[in-house]
Amino acid sequence: MRVADSTVYNSFISGYEVTDSKLQNTMEQLSSGKKVNSASDDPAATSKIISLNTAISQNDMYSTTISDSISWDESQDSALSSISDVMLNIRTLVEEAANSTNNSTDYSAIKDEVEQDIKQVVSTLNTKYSGSYIFGGGDNSTEPFELETDSDGNITGLTYNGDSKNLTREISSGTTVSLFADGSEFLTADSSSSSDSSSTDSTSSTLGSYFSDLISALNSGDTSSLSGDLLTETDDYRNNFVNIRASIGSLTDRLETASDLNSTRETNLKSDLSDVQDVDVAEAYTQFSEEKVAYQAVLAMGTKILDTSILDYID
């Protein structure tokens, strides 16, 4: 049966287009390093790639939140460490002031130092992280703590301008943490945390009234109050700062664990994406070599077909 020239030519064109398309696709894979360069290459793989990229992006967002939360906690830990040291110094000064051998000059000097320490405590409670007050509650744009003074400049109390809210952060899908921010928790303290085991009643004052009473006792040389209630309250409030710092430390440990899990998930997601998307260079190059041979064979066949003339059919 005689095969028409048009049939042979069309067969050649079809074969050429197939081999050329395969060769071009493999060359593009080698050039880009990706198996899938357009959705039409592999619709199923494209869908999976989109899903994995979305998961990676979401995981990156959680990573940023976790990192920022850890930094928030670290700022608080540093602030409370400083306050704890200052409160310990206040305790030393209260013990010193409770000595009945002090004169008015001694009390004045001690009072000046205690006032500076109190101001340092309040200043540290107004610490900012990334533009936000770390102990201002949910309203962390307003300076939360403000000392009250009388006309003589004596400390008479402490005002808290924040609220009692903490900050909720999502650190993974369906998992949230509550970052400490409620500065009102510093205003009262339970004496059950005091190092004095004989103390059974809760501290009745607030941090502001404690500061006021302490300054008043130093002004009057009230050794009874200084060696009694005020010394106990100094321990109570210092212990309260320490206990809150400990709870923040526990949260930091949880966040660091979450950070490790987040890093592991990122590694797994990127590995899965690579399996679907990245080309095996050695395999692709071998395929390219085979397709190049096939492509050259088609071209060689085309040369013979296109060179055919009427003389080839004359016996």
Image: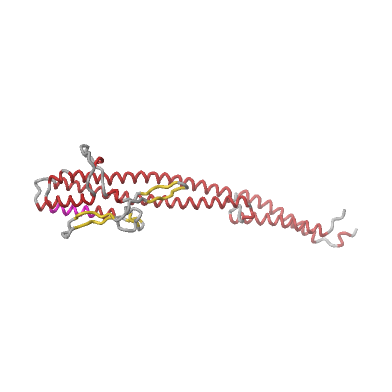
In the image: residue 313, left or right of residue 180:
right
Q: Position of residue 249 (x, y in %)?
A: 34, 45
Q: Position of residue 195 (x, y in %)?
A: 23, 40
Seen as rendered, the residue at the extreme bottom is: 310
Q: Which residues are magenta?
A: 108-119
- Residue 113 highlighted magenta (yes or no): yes
In the image: residue 295, left or right of residue 91:
right
Residue positioned 19% across, 52% down in the render: 212
Q: Main secondary structure of the magenta part?
A: helix
Q: Position of residue 135 (x, y in %)?
A: 32, 52
- Residue 19 highlighted magenta (yes or no): no
Residue positioned 80% across, 61% down in the render: 307
Q: Which colour style is shown?
A: secondary structure
Seen as rendered, the residue at the extreme top is: 198
Marks counted in the figure total 0
Looking at the image, is 267 positioned above or below residue 310? Answer: above
Seen as rendered, the residue at the extreme right is: 315
Looking at the image, is 298 positioned above or below residue 172? Answer: below
Q: Could you say which is closer to the camera, residue 137 or residue 117?
A: 137
Looking at the image, is 198 positioned above or below residue 111? Answer: above
Q: Could you say which is closer to the camera, residue 247 or residue 299?
A: 247
Q: Position of residue 53 (x, y in %)?
A: 53, 52
Q: Quadrant of the C terminus?
A: bottom right
